Each structure stands twice: as structure tokens, then as C-alpha cells.
Amino acid sequence: GLQEGVAAMTDIETVRVIYRAMAERDLDTLFGLVDESCVVTQDPLLPWGGRHVGHDGFASFALTLTVPVLGVALAQLAD
């Protein structure tokens, strides 16, 4: 399952999978990779800014990001 696959991934591979899941709006994969008590803090001036807590907060954060922003991030990770 997902948990066994996560254990075999490097940190960079995990981030790539998270970004891809965010771009695809794949909440099942995101929730399998992100801890229930996670906190994401972004500059409040950004459209996806603020403090996002737990799975609900992370889902809100992920769904607010636009595909072009994720496309740039994925391209940078590919380098």
C-alpha cells in the first residue's frame, strides 16, 4: 500500500508525489503522505497564505494553489 511505498521514497521523491497529488487534487494520496497534525504556514499576502492546520487545513492549502504554480515547482524539482 501507500505506507510501504512511502518508506522506500527519498525526501525529494516524497515532495514530488505530494506536489503531483496537489496538482491532481488527489486528497487520498495527500492524506496518506501528510501527518494529521501538520501545519503549513505561508505569507498571508499570498492567495494560499495563512496558517493551515491538519488534513483539513492542508487540503484547503493544496486546493488553493494553482496548477501553474505547481507546474513551476515540479519543473524545479525535476532539475
Image (tube, rainbow, N blue to C red):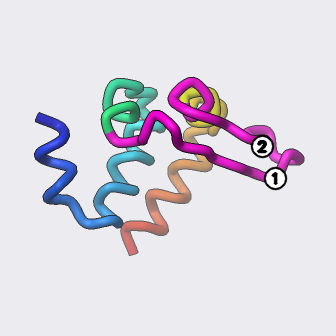
**Does 36 lie within the magenta span?**
yes
Q: Residues within 10 Å of mark 1 (few under 14, many from 20)?
A: few
Q: Which mark is residue 43?
A: 1
In the image, what residue occupies the spot 41% across and 41% down? Answer: 34
- Mark 2 or mark 1: whose residue is earlier in sequence: 1
Q: Tell me the crowding category of disc 2: few under 14, some 14 to 19, or many 20 or more residues within 10 angstroms, Cα based.
A: some
Q: Secondary structure at mark 2?
A: loop
- Report which residue position mark 2 lands on: 49
Number of numbered discs present? 2
Residue at x-position 34% and y-position 66%: 12
Please identify the quadrant where the N terminus is shown. top left
Alpha carbons under labels 2 and 1: distance apart: 5 Å
Residue 66: quadrant of the picture: top right
- Rendered location of residue 10, percent (x, y): 25, 66
Say which residue appears at 85% left-offset and 45% top-offset: 44
> Is 69 positioned to the left or the right of 55 in the image?
right
Q: Residue 48: percent from the left, percent from the top?
A: 73, 39
Is disc 2 in contact with disc 1, using a CB cutoff of under 8 Å?
yes
Which amino acid type is shown beneath numbered disc 1?
Asp
SS under mark 1:
loop
Residue at 21% x, 50% y is 6
